[in-house]
Amino acid sequence: MNKTNKTTKKGGAKGASFSFDSAALAKRLLAAAPERAREVLTRRFGLGAVAARETLEAIGDLSGITRERVRQIEAAGLDAIRASKAFKEAVGAFEEIAQYIHSLGAIVPEEALLSALGKDEKSRNRFRFFLMVNAAFFRERETNDFLARWHVDHTTAKHIHDALTRLYSSLSDSDVLAESEMLDRFLDELKGVNDAYKNEEVLKRWLSLSKHIGSNPLAEWGRTTASAIHIKGVRDYAYLAVKRHGAPMHFSEVAKTIGALFSKKAHVATTHNELIKDPRFVLVGRGLYALTEWGYKPGVVREVIRETLAAKGPMKKDEIIKHVKKARFVKDNTILVNLNDSRYFKRLKDGRYAAV
C-alpha cells in the first residue's frame, strides 16, 4: 500500500492512502510503451534510479535529436500506454486518485496535490506520471492569475475560476478581512457549485489557487498586494503585532512580540527605527506606538492641544486633559506644561483655554 504524508503547504491537504502500490503500477504502465519511448518517459518523469526530471531539450541534446522529436516520442509513448491492457487493468487505481481529488474539492493546486499524493520526490513523480497518462485528469497551466492546478471536473473548475475573479474584483487594496468574513464573501460568489464541496478546508484550498488573494500569519485575508497581507519585513510584522495587541505598545515589546508571534528575530533598535519611518504608526508616548488607523495622528502634545481647541473651541483645563489623553499616553503635567506656554495658548477670563 502506498501511503503519503501530511502537508502544510499553501492549499495543502492531508496525505492520501491508496490500495495500490504506486511503484509497481508505474512499472507495469511503462512496460507497455516501446523501448525508446519508455526511456524518454522514464527520464521526463524521473521514474528511474534518479528522481530528477529532465527537460525535452536535455534529453534531445543527449540523444542527438531535436526537442520536438523528443516530444513526439513522449506523446507516442503515452498513447501506447493508454491503449494497453495494463492501462485498462489500472482503472481501479485511477478511480481512487480521481475520488481523492474530488475529496479535495475537484480542483487543487498542483504543488499541494502532488505533496499530498507522494511522500517523497520519487513517489510524487509517479503520481505526476499517472495524472498525465490518464485523460480523465486535467492540468491547467500557471497563468498571471492562477497557480498551476489539476482538476477532474471542467464545470466546477470554471465556476471556481470565475468566483475567484469576482471575489478579487470586489476587494479593495486596503481590505483586510478576518478569515470567516473572507470565506463568507467567497461563498456568496460560488453559485452553481456543488454544496458537498463547500467546507472550510476546501474553500481555503480554492482560495489558494489565486495569485492575487492571500492571507497573512494572523489568518487575515485580502489582496496579495496589500501591505498587511504581503509581509516583507520588520515593519509589516510590527504592524501585525501591534494590531493583534489592540493597544499602543512600547517598541521593545513590539520587537519581542515579533519573535514570539512569528518566530522572526527583530532587534529592538531596528524595530524602533522602522516604526519611526512608517506612517502606519504614531508615537503616542515615550516609546509607545499606536496605529494611525485607530484615529491617532502624528504630532507633539502641543499640536494635539491645538487641534483639540480648533475642533471644540475654548475648553477648561480638565476637558483639554481628557481629550489629549485619548490621543497621547502622557502624564497630566506634560499636558499642563504645554498648555501654559503663552507662545501658543492663552487662558481666558472664564478659565477656559484658547489657542493664540
Image (spheres, rainbow, N blue to C red):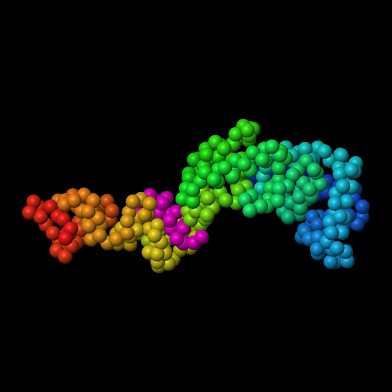
Looking at the image, is 283 positioned above or below residue 192? below
Q: Quadrant of residue 38?
A: bottom right
Q: Residue at x 80, y 43 (%)?
A: 135
Relative to 343, 50 lies left or right:
right
From the viewer's side, name the closer residue of 352 and 207.
352
Image quarter in which the C terminus is found: bottom left
Looking at the image, is 58 positioned above or below residue 111? below
Q: Residue at x 34, y 58 (%)?
A: 282
Q: Residue at x 54, y 52 (%)?
A: 224
Residue 48 shows in this picture: no
Queried whether the magenta region covers residue 111, the answer comes back as no
Coordinates of residue 80 in the picture (x, y in percent): 89, 47
Image quarter in which the N terminus is found: top right
Coordinates of residue 236 in the picture (x, y in percent): 46, 58
Coordinates of residue 320 in the picture (x, y in percent): 19, 52
Coordinates of residue 258 in the picture (x, y in percent): 45, 58
Q: Residue at x 76, y 50 (%)?
A: 128
Total labels: the figure holds 0
Looking at the image, is 27 positioned above or below residue 106? below
- As drawn, the residue found furthest toward the left would be 349
Q: Quadrant of residue 248?
A: bottom left
Q: Main secondary structure of the magenta part?
A: helix
Relative to 297, 190 lies left or right:
right
Which residues lie in the magenta part?
Answer: 232-249
Relative to 335, 196 lies left or right:
right
